[in-house]
Image (spheres, grey):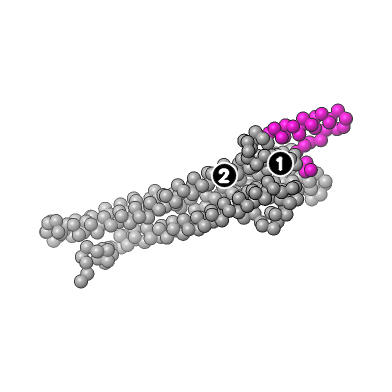
Amino acid sequence: MENPLGFAHFLAHTDIVARIVLCLMLIASIGSWYLIATKGVRGLRTRRRSAEFLAAFWEAPNLEAVAARIREKGTTEPFAHLVHHGFTAIEQHNRCKSGGECSTVNLVNAGNPEDLLTSALKRAIDEDKASLEFGQTFLATVASSAPFVGLFGTVWGIYHALIAIGMSGQGTLDKVAGPVGEALIMTGIGLAVAIPAAVAYNHFARENRGTLSQLNAFAYDVFAFLATGVKTSPMLTDARTTSEKVIAMARAQGVAAGAECQPTHPGLALR
């Protein structure tokens, strides 16, 4: 015997509006869980590859070893991608300096070498940020809108339940509980869709902030490394302070050497 208060009974008595609401929430739930699964797996792989690359970067004897690893492993994680952009800026500057492919000044290579390297690293961080935040807007939209979509379905169901009760002329508890309870199912479905999306959004947002913070700190070390050829301490102290001290020392040495020969720009001078 069919349960008159079950979910199957609820589906059998829904109209077109309620079914559209259910379809919307089903699509939102499938999309949310797809993003939760794919972003979770990709995040685990990215963190493992980032740890391996950072360990290899600080243990590398020179820039050529780092470049060889990037060519071998690719730039599938943010830190390798950042260093790859730095190498690209170095190569572009060297080509322009030697009168190669870009012997004329254009908007890309205009400015001093340090600005070119800084813009390349910043562009890499922006690209990584966009990649890390993929799907975040969808999760935020589902988390904020699904409860209200479910509430709309609840209101619509209660409206039709009250009309049916009024037409039957029976307002006893056993007649009211069934239709109203079925309508409230919509609220439960909305919450069931919204809660996982909200938890996933907060989790991924926190992880992205941590990754971007580490990436920004690493960018200062990469800038100092590529600009002076000297590797700074691997985050034993504040990365920005360490990098600025190294660059200041290199500039001071360049000024001191200027008494004997024409001073050269220390930026992007690979050693």
Identify the residue under disc 1. 231
Look at the numbered disc 2 and give the secondary structure of its residue. Answer: helix
Reply yes or no: does residue 241 show up in magenta.
no
Q: For label 2, count other residues whose C-alpha is less than 10 Å away and answer few (under 14), some (14-19) or many (20+).
A: some
Q: Locate residue 142 relative to residue 75 in the image: left or right.
A: left
- Can residue 161 be seen in this snapshot? no
Nearest the eye: 177 or 52:
52
Q: Which mark is residue 116?
A: none
For discs 1 and 2, the disc positioned in front in the rendered view: 1
Residue at position x 76%, y 45% in the image: 93
The location of residue 202, given as percent across then percent down, is: 45, 47
Identify the residue under disc 2. 212
The amino acid sitting under disc 2 is Leu
Residue at position x 65%, y 39% in the image: 220
Quadrant holding the N terminus? bottom left
The location of residue 116, given as percent across then percent down, is: 71, 42
Q: Locate residue 68 relative to residue 157 in the image: left or right.
A: right
